[in-house]
Image (cartoon, grey):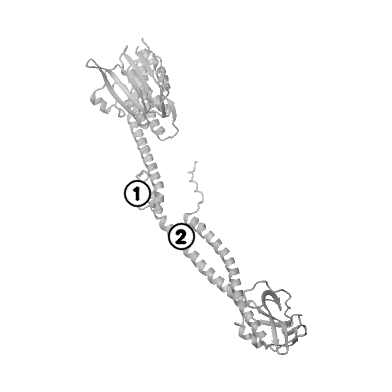
Amino acid sequence: MSRATTPARPARTVSLRRYLLVGILLPAALLITVNAVGLYRQTFRAVNTAYDRTLLASAKTISEQLDVTGFDDEARIRATVPYSALEAFEADNQSRMFYRVSSLRGEIVSGFDELPPWLGRMPDKTTYAALVHFYDTTFRNQPVRVGVLLQPVVSANGRGMAVIQVAETLELRENLTRQILLDTVTREAALVLVIAFITVLVVQRATRPVRRMSAELATRPEDDLTPIDAPHAPRELLPMIEATNGLMERLSHLLEHQKRFVRDASHQLRTPLAVLRAQVQSALRGDVEPKQALAEIEDTVERATQLANQMLALAKVEQLRQQADATVVDWAEIVRNVALDLSPLMADRDLDFSIDTQSAPVHAHEWMLRELSRNLLHNAIKHSPEHGRLHVSLVSDTRHAALTVSDSGPGISGELRRRLFQPFSPGDTRGGSGLGLAICREIVQALEGSITLDNREQLGRVAGLDATVRLPVMTPPVTPAATPLVQNEG
């Protein structure tokens, strides 16, 4: 027992909203991260510069409490600096300050003995009007920032050089840096959220016409192929809408052609099948001789076969019209081959046949040109009297190629001319399906050409019919050499 196959699920695709969010927010987040790292370093340097001035002020305050006895190498420095003198420079309880006063020889004078002595050298350039140097080290297992001031000490009893070190723990600097960084990142994160909200809102609004069209198409009946009407669609969607409308137009035309084909086939094949059934029943009852019955059945089958072949040919023209794989073919060669194929029919009617062709490169499916030439020539053979004349000519210039099939039949009337290209309108009601010229017209229209039927008159009376087809050529033909005149005289 067969089970209905479920359609395969479409591949997972990324929505436009997600695509834009990732495409915009990911670079923005990366830029914010890089900016945050750079901002942290820049802010920390700025905070260090600001608080280093506090260290320098502290060191200068301590230098005002120094005294000296003796000169130069014999100088003895004394200091009376209470720790409370540094409390004025402590901004809050987050950080602590320490100091150390020593001589150039490293002899401690006052302060914290465990604070490592300064062993560096003064920078060549400084922004301060003092011999000062700042550096980072560790004191009591805590990172500290140290400012070193080389301060000359002069008194009435001596002259010397003091080394004043003031150290501060980094809690206040780090907290201030982190607070500045956090405030900046918070604002940038809020900006990213605003960008994300605006992106979602804009995408939602921009894709509204697409959703509206999708809902409209989903609720349409299966046979509704009218164009999509989206007057408020964005300009970027217009090419897709125009392409979709073009596809719907082609599908509508193809669907209408299929409906017409099915309708015509059911109508036209019903008659020969009914006749064939009646003939078979008559033969079975013995109403007619077996040989006559078989001849009648053969004639009906032949007519039905011709009708079916021509209806399939008419459907194939529409199929090839939708295809874009046509090539450039020489129409002259096809006309000569078709004439050769139909030569037995010309011989049966003892026609005086002649053909004259020039090279005619036409952009078309070879089957179309062959079917067009065959129908025109076969129609001319059928309507030419026995021992009549039949002439085929193909001429070409830089723009068009013209095929003319001239028979010596009775021509056509004005009333017949108006309906002769319509399907199932035969010129001879005693035979034929009336599809030959309809097929020719469909092929000519598909190739952007024209077809005309004109009575040829001689001495004031109709001497035959000229069927002329003009098709555009691809390139200017090479100087053509006329083919030899071929005649078939019974």
At numbered mark 2, what does the secondary structure look like: helix, strand or loop?
helix
Q: Amino acid at mark 2?
A: Thr
Which residue is disc 2 drawn over? 199
Q: Amino acid at mark 1?
A: Asp
Query: Which residue does the image show at 40% across and 33% down from the upper left?
Result: 319
Tell which tag, 2 or 1, sits nearer the viewer. Answer: 2
The foreground one among 453 and 380 is 453
Whole-percent x, y for residue 39 in the image: 57, 68
**Is residue 3 placed above or below 455 in the rendered structure?**
below
**Is residue 125 placed above or below 452 in the rendered structure?**
below
Asked if residue 276 can be seen in this view, the reply is: yes
The tag on residue 229 is 1
The foreground one among 72 and 299 is 72
The foreground one among 136 and 353 is 136
Whole-percent x, y for residue 8 in the image: 50, 46
Farthest residue, direction top: 490
Asked if residue 426 can be seen in this view, the reply is: no
Query: Which residue does the image show at 43% across and 60% down from the upper left?
Result: 201
Farthest residue, direction left: 460
Q: CA distance from mark 2 to mark 1?
A: 27 Å
At numbered mark 1, what does the secondary structure look like: helix, strand or loop?
loop
The quarter holding residue 446 reads: top left
